[in-house]
Every structure is written in structure tokens, then in C-alpha cells.
Image (cartoon, helix red, strand yellow):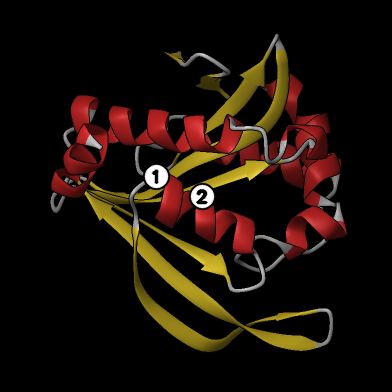
Amino acid sequence: MIIGKLCLLRALEKSDLDLLRVWSNDAETMSMLGGWHFPVSQMEHEEWFKSNLNNFLNRRFAIEVDGNMVGTANLVQINWKDRNAFQGTMIGNPKFRGIGIGKEVIDLIMRYSFNELGLKRLDSDIISTNAQSLNLYTQKCGWEIEGRQKDWYFRNDAWHDRILVGITREQYLRHLQG
């Protein structure tokens, strides 16, 4: 477990799948996230879970507050040779959005990635309509905007840009110093 003040990160368990499926099938939640999404069945979620067991290139964590899972955090596409990974966070329970959980999760993932795993950099991408996430990563957590891909995401009958963000270990250490 990775323990913070507001939450902890733990391994996903099979018992988490029902709640994950609810969030995966929630159009509002999925509209704020990158990637593409289809409705997911229980069987598909179980197969996805099994395929990720012992996969050290893709690690997924449950975000837990007071014994309840409220979202997920990911370190995926881990490149152990070049020491980088893609990071994503989803607060699936809306009542836990905007209260500091996301910031703590990203801080915990950065600490774990840079100090425990020895990674050099982390990347993420944000849909341009998700101003809250962009502010969180860039203003509160020290990440930098590294690029923009025009008309990357199609949501609600409109095109939206993909904003690429990243942080290196050195930037993280400077961010810690304030």
C-alpha cells in the first residue's frame, strides 16, 4: 500500500470489479477521460482483470478513502529500460472530486515512481474540456504542458484537443521544494 493523509493506494482486487464497471459505463465520467470507451460487461471486466495480473508493464491501483474505493490510479506503459511511464487518475465517485484527493494521488504516484521505482519521467494526457484536471496537474502538481494535438478526441458530437503533460524526476524534486 501507498499511504497518504487523505487516501491510500492499494492493489485492485476482484471485489472492486462491480464498482469499476459502474464507473466504466458512466458516460459523464468517461467523457472527461482520454482513450475511447465502450460499454463494458461483467465478463469483459473479469477478463481485463485476469489479463492484468502479474503485468509489470501496467500497474493499476485502487484509490481508497475510509475503506471505500473512490477511484483508480494507473502507471501503465512502463518502460523499464528508459525509465518512464504513463500516469492516469480517475476519481469515479463524484463526491470525492475537487477536495484534494486527486492532488494527493498524483503526489503519491510521483513519490512512488521517482523514489521507489527509480523512474526518470511520467507522462499523461488530458482532454481539453477537463480544465480541472489540467489545473491539477500543471498548477498544483508541477507538471508541464509539453504539447497539444488538435481535434484528437470526439465527445458529445464535437472535437477536442489532447493536451500532453509530463514531469521529470528533477522537476518533481524542484516542485517539492516549493
Residue 4 on image: x %, y %:
47, 16
User: Mark 1 highlights which residue?
Assistant: 141
Q: Nearer the viewer, residue 126 or 141?
A: 141
Mark yes or no: residue 119 visible: no
Element type where label 1 sits in the image = loop
Horizontally, is 173 left or right of 86 in the view? left
Q: What's the amino acid at mark 1?
A: Cys
Q: Mark 2 is on which residue type?
A: Leu
Which of the 4 image quadrants contains residue 1? top left
**In terms of sequence position, does the residue under pointer 1 or pointer 2 come before the other?**
2
Quadrant location of residue 95? Answer: top right
Badge 2: residue crowd in 10 Å (few <14, some 14–19, many ≥20): some
Residue 173 visible? The answer is yes
Residue at x 59% of width, y 32% of height: 100
Q: Residue furthest front?
A: 178
Q: Are marks 1 and 2 in contact (CB under 8 Å)?
A: yes
Q: Residue at x 52, y 60 (%)?
A: 134
In this rendering, is residue 101 above or below 136? above
Q: Which mark is residue 136?
A: 2
From the viewer's perspective, tell me whether residue 175 is left or right of residue 89: left
- Residue 86: percent from left, percent from top: 38, 53
Residue 170, position as x, y percentages in the image: 13, 46
Q: Badge 1, how many Cα within 10 Å: few under 14, some, many 20+?
A: some
Secondary structure beneath disc 2? helix
Spatial distance from mark 1 to mark 2, Cα to Cα? 6 Å
Using the image, determine if residue 72 lies above or below residue 41. Answer: above
- Against 87, residue 151 (above or below) is below
Quadrant assignment for the C terminus: top left
Q: Residue at left 78%, top 53%?
A: 29
Compared with 128, 116 (above or below) is above
